[in-house]
Image: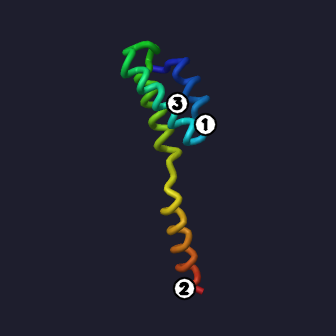
């Protein structure tokens, strides 16, 4: 089921940075927790925002180690 309002909101949220997306998701969760169903389809929007939040989550430490390991492996091959 395609919900136009939820789709538009998620398309807008896709452009946000991690911190902004985190606060938006947290605010919607707290609001939905204290006032159930104040926004129609809030649960579906919340799941979509969580998906975007986890998709934008990057572990800088891991990506740096991976780049260093790739560099070391490349140097060993040559």
Q: Number of marks in the image? A: 3
Question: Residue drawn at (52%, 30%), measured in percent from left and top?
Answer: 24
Label 2 SS: helix
Which residue in the protein does label 3 denote? 24
Choose mark 3 or mark 1, whichever is in front: 3
Mark 2 or mark 1: whose residue is earlier in sequence: 1
**Badge 2 local density, few (<14 within 10 Å), some, or many (20+)?**
few
Q: Nearer the viewer, residue 52 or 36?
A: 36
**Badge 1 local density, few (<14 within 10 Å), some, or many (20+)?**
some
Q: 66 above or below 1?
A: below
Q: Image quadrant for the N terminus?
A: top left
Label 1 SS: loop
Which residue in the protein does label 1 denote? 16
Question: Residue drawn at (50%, 37%), measured in percent from left and top?
Answer: 22
Give x and y (percent) for residue 38.
Answer: 43, 13
Q: Look at the numbered discs 3 and 2 and tell me whether their residues touch, using CB distance below 8 Å.
A: no
Give x and y (percent) for residue 13.
Answer: 58, 31
Which of the numbered marks, if any, corresponds to residue 75?
none
Q: Nearer the viewer, residue 18 or 7?
A: 18
Q: Look at the numbered discs 2 and 1 and tell me whether their residues touch, using CB distance below 8 Å.
A: no
Q: Look at the numbered discs 3 and 1 and tell me whether their residues touch, using CB distance below 8 Å.
A: yes
Choose mark 2 or mark 1, whichever is in front: 1
Give x and y (percent) for residue 68.
Answer: 55, 73
Which of the numbered marks, if any, corresponds to residue 76?
2
């Amino acid at each position: 089921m395609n919900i136009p309002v939820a789709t538009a909101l998620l398309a807008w949220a896709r452009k946000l940075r991690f911190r902004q997306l985190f606060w938006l998701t947290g605010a919607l969760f707290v609001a939905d927790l204290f006032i159930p169903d104040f926004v129609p389809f809030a649960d579906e929007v919340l799941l979509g925002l969580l998906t975007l939040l986890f998709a934008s989550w990057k572990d800088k430490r891991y990506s740096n180690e991976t780049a260093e390991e790739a560099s070391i492996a490349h140097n060993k091959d040559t």
